[in-house]
Amino acid sequence: MGSEVSTGAGRKARGREDRRQAILDGAFAVFARQGYAQTCVQEVAREAGVAKPTVYNHLADKESLYREAVEAAADRVGARCLAVVDALREVAADTDPEEGLRTVGRELLRICHDEEARAVQRLAGAEAARFPGLEASARERTALRIRSALADRLARLALAGRLRPCEPEPAAEHFLALLTGPLEYRPDADPDALAEAAVDVFLRAYGPGAGPRPGLG
Amino acid sequence: MGSEVSTGAGRKARGREDRRQAILDGAFAVFARQGYAQTCVQEVAREAGVAKPTVYNHLADKESLYREAVEAAADRVGARCLAVVDALREVAADTDPEEGLRTVGRELLRICHDEEARAVQRLAGAEAARFPGLEASARERTALRIRSALADRLARLALAGRLRPCEPEPAAEHFLALLTGPLEYRPDADPDALAEAAVDVFLRAYGPGAGPRPGLG
Amino acid sequence: MGSEVSTGAGRKARGREDRRQAILDGAFAVFARQGYAQTCVQEVAREAGVAKPTVYNHLADKESLYREAVEAAADRVGARCLAVVDALREVAADTDPEEGLRTVGRELLRICHDEEARAVQRLAGAEAARFPGLEASARERTALRIRSALADRLARLALAGRLRPCEPEPAAEHFLALLTGPLEYRPDADPDALAEAAVDVFLRAYGPGAGPRPGLG
Amino acid sequence: MGSEVSTGAGRKARGREDRRQAILDGAFAVFARQGYAQTCVQEVAREAGVAKPTVYNHLADKESLYREAVEAAADRVGARCLAVVDALREVAADTDPEEGLRTVGRELLRICHDEEARAVQRLAGAEAARFPGLEASARERTALRIRSALADRLARLALAGRLRPCEPEPAAEHFLALLTGPLEYRPDADPDALAEAAVDVFLRAYGPGAGPRPGLG
DNA sequence: TATGAATGAGCCTTCATTCAT
DNA sequence: GATGAATGAAGGCTCATTCAT
């Protein structure tokens, strides 16, 4: 009924859902650039190429605009990360996982580094006072989802004897912490080097050779 | 200096410097509770027990208020962390550092968990758009200071053979990441257990026994 | 006319005129409930069961909507009052008019008391600033019409010697004032009692026995 | 300090209370001219000679502004009417009250006729939907107060034998109704004539000579 | 003709900041 | 130096009204 092919025409989004998406995308862009309070709905409207009341026709108020824009972006970021982690499924049970973990590490770091992911984290945490559940919701959509997926993979690797027996969730947390923690101290470090170091430490601690803790006996 | 005895009178802060401190403390409390935009100078004044123009007599404007309040709090948090890390100086060169690292880990986690530290991190990051340098400045006063101090200690431990030879800064980053990373996934986990697990992994990877990486040959 | 049979279909008003009436009725209901400014055209449309632009298809704008709705309601109220007053025609010339006046009074008070009549008066006066002629127009359709009809009846009664000779219009005004005036002070008084008292006073002053003013000689 | 004599200087109101009064007066003037919805706070501010936020410094919001302005005006109107009615105290017990009642009637009508009184009535009733208690409150301050005072006077006159025995409140209501009722039909009639007619009818019905109702035997 | 969607205009309210005391 | 009061500027939200279907 008009929207099936309409956006293909190169014009503005015409279907109702497209319009809504365009508004949410514009909102996320402006909020990411300026923060919640510095952004006025007028600017969001301009960015989306619509008039101000049109924004209110699709989203109830500025707060909904923010919340929904952030959550949608969190979903996108989470999905990208999941895809990366899922690549570990390809690692054959009889293969050394080192290269696979490095690849995953590198690509996760690249995602963490890009604007969208950082904006999601920033925007979700920045307005914790005004949006009580938002930070948790964004974490759910990103970090927790990633940890679960990674824990699944690590569990399979441990089962296959490519890692030492361990609890998968804490192991996944440690992997991700080793990977992204250093970003806090050196935001501009080379992602490849960071990933390599993280995998090195991770495998020293969680690799298959490790029986009891080395050096304890 | 004037402030050493002034507050002894029992009344409100009377010395100029005390007054300023009271305002900054009030500002931090209100900002932490409500965020920058939701806070009006009136409320800061009320919290500090002064009139609004008095605030302007001490701080140029709302932005200075925020910046200085956050930086002062960051200094306090950083100082508390430094004190904890410095306790590692007491670990004798011929002692197993495990217990010391655990203690440090536990206490750092406790600091990370309290309101002030979290507020500092949140407030510094939240207004990155409005206060370009603030996040870096807060990081400088907290995370980077801690990493440096910790790297110093780890270097001495490695030199004493209690850790394997390694670059101290990345090692410190890994230690701190292993420690605080899991908080992101389980904010209410038991700090002691978290610290124990972090130290366990850290020592498996950085302990003295580790020659080449286990499992590589 | 088109509307005579159209509504028989059981669906919503289909004839153009019926549709218009439905809209005006809905408008009056909503305006009466909320006032002019608090009412948005959207609500009128909902009340009438049509879409917003349909309202604009029948009435030029919100102001016409208001004016026409109020005037139509004023006509209805006026007609009801007229019917009541006209019942006085039945009072035979050689009968004591007291009972007839009481009945008229009672029924007029009942009309004054119901929602529609009060809403008409309120809505017409409320927006005097925005609708200059509306208050007068409503008065014309209600109070003045009633007064005229009543004056006619009183004139006939005076001619028949059932009232003292007097000017009919002021007499009618006094009758109506005695009747409805007390409502201002006791909106919830018993209409029957009010009517009885009003007729009693009216007949003391306008009854046939009254030659010159009693007590003046 | 400063407001005791300040307004005498011819400058704008300087004391806090004066300022508030000026704002309420300006508000009443503008609301009376344009109605609630057509009036924006900006205009009230301009009328009062202050800036918009100053209005908000004294009155919480537009609704308070309206309510308080209307109630203050109602008090003024009520007080003026009371003064008129109280003049009846001067009527000696052994004097015919006709002239006194006429004077009271004339002056009450004049008050009813002036802008302020009409505006009070209009504004109080117009926004009944938005200000539930306002109409009653204004009535309390005007009509009911007047009725009470008048009933007191009529009771004394009846006691002195200058009126027939009667219940004072209904008598007062009838007097006021006879007086102001005709305004509804002839808003521009001569107040003196209206008053004379009202008193004439009133005394025919409530005068001392009236034993049983004339014409009943 | 009836409707879903879009828009231009306007208004209440808040707040950082500055005088005058 | 500290305060009460005043203000300029700005932004969220609503709504009457009009296209396009």
Image (tube, coloured by chain):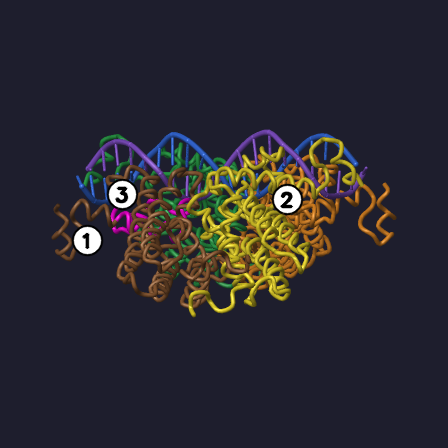
Chain colours: A yellow, B brown, C orange, D green, E purple, F blue
Could you tell me which residue is drawn at 33 percent across and 57 percent down?
B157
Q: Which residue is mark 1?
A: B12
Q: Chain of mark 2?
A: A
Marks 3 and 1 in Cβ contact (< 8 Å)? no
Callout 2: SS: helix
Q: Residues within 10 Å of mark 3 (few under 14, many from 20)?
A: many
Residue C187 at x, y = what percent? 53, 58
Instruction: Measure the C-alpha gap from mark 1 to mark 2.
Output: 52 Å
Q: Is residue B213 left or right of residue C84?
A: left
Q: Position of residue A181 (x, y in %)?
A: 46, 51
Q: Say which of A42 and F17 sits in front.
A: A42
Q: Residue at x 83, y 44 (%)?
A: C15
List the residue tagged with mark 2: A58
Query: Which residue is depicted at the point 12% across and 47% down?
Result: B2
User: What chain does mark 1 sit on?
Assistant: B
Which region is colored magenta? B23-52
Q: Is residue D87 above or below residue D14?
A: below
Drawn side of residue B140 relative to residue C211, left or right = left
Q: CA distance from mark 3 to mark 1?
A: 15 Å
Secondary element at tag 1: loop
Q: Amino acid at mark 2?
A: His
Mark 3–mark 2 Cα distance, whole angstroms, equals: 42 Å
Which residue position holds label 3?
B55
